[in-house]
Amino acid sequence: MRVAIVGATGAVGHELMGVLEKSSLKFDELLLFASPRSAGHLLTFRGQELTVQVTPEGAIDADVILASAGGAISKEKAPAWVAGGAVVIDNSSAFRYDPEVPLVVPEVNGEAALHHRGIIANPNCTTAVAVLAVAPIHREYGVRRMIVSTYQATSGAGQKGMDELLEQTHMVLHGQEAGHKVFSHPIPFNVIPHIDAFQDNGYTKEEMKVVWETRKIMGDDSLKISCTAVRIPTLRTHSEAITLELERPATPDAVRELLSRSGGVEVRDDPGGQVYPMPLTASGKYDVEVGRIRESLVFDGGIDLFVAGDQLLKGAALNAVQIAEYLQEHGALREKQRA
């Protein structure tokens, strides 16, 4: 069984290797691919040094390809990878809205992965963090309206986003004026209510991704969702304040109990003890933290909550590997015949 990572030297690529180190996925060989400028780099996996290869033009001789090299690469090359017999789990936005491609968070709609036609899409990191908390509530009580405000780390823009935060913060602390290349404004000691391109309706594409993808993953196009996405000066872990209007009233205690039994969720909800979700505690953690669970003051019987999830893990690398694990556990991942 061969697994390949395309985009191995990027931020998500590094996380993919770390997750695979601990994964229950059974495979014999890991292949690493990236752009020509990264070819020849040596990366260590399970005590062995692996050489990064240039992503080929055609098929890759692997059974599973974890793709995290950007939408343009996936759009161009994934069909050839599938034609070569691989299952492609794609971390870009290239296929998320294709009705023929399942968009999967295993704890929520893992069965959708079993009906793929060669490609399975990973959701946007913000969506993945949100649906782990919201989907169990939707199943139990029915979500009618969902209002989300996000607090998104600079790693959402990749390694270059984190580098800009560190470099520009250093400049400000040494009396220099901060510049910006990755973000639309300087990020140190600032928050920027602008992620991705603005759409005709006044929302950004990042905000609309939460709308489109939540509906697809939860299988409910009737959900009314509004999102405001904000970039904040942290390195990793996205946080979100979520307000839910429910079809059937819920109490905070009932929601806490429900979420404590839900996969991929850790309830951290003791305001008196100053315990609640934060990037500081959620970073590097597989589960998404959920807390500040309380009655809505706007919607009768509604719920307010706060979530924090490491978007490089559950929002990207971890979710992709979990999809592969799900396929293997259900007998839907088989080694190709090789000469």
Image: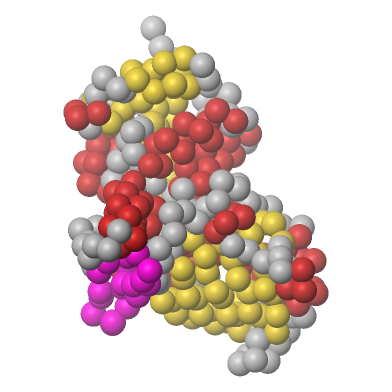
Image quadrant where residue 77 sits: top left
> Residue 201 is drawn in which quadrant?
bottom left
> Furthest residue to the front?
175
Q: Quadrant of the C terminus?
A: top left
- The picture places residue 274, in percent across and down from the top left corner, at 71, 69
Quarter of the image where one finds residue 206: bottom left
Measuring from the top left, give residue 332's x and y in whole percent: 55, 33
Q: Is residue 176 left or right of residue 141?
A: left
Q: Nearer the viewer, residue 250 or 334?
A: 250
Q: Residue at x 34, y 64 (%)?
A: 188
- List x then y, in percent, for residue 230: 39, 71
Question: Is residue 125 shown left or right of residue 157?
Answer: right
Q: Magenta residues, as a range?
A: 185-204
Relative to 136, say whether 149 is above or below.
below
Query: Residue at the location (75% across, 77% down)?
Result: 252
Q: Residue furthest top?
A: 339
Q: Is residue 166 left or right of residue 319?
A: left
Asked whether residue 306 appears in the rendered view, the answer is yes
179 in relation to 1, above or below: below
Q: Is residue 197 magenta?
A: yes
Could you say where residue 55 lies in the image, as x and y percent from the top left? 25, 28
The foreground one among 308 and 264 is 308
Q: Nearer the viewer, residue 246 or 34?
A: 34
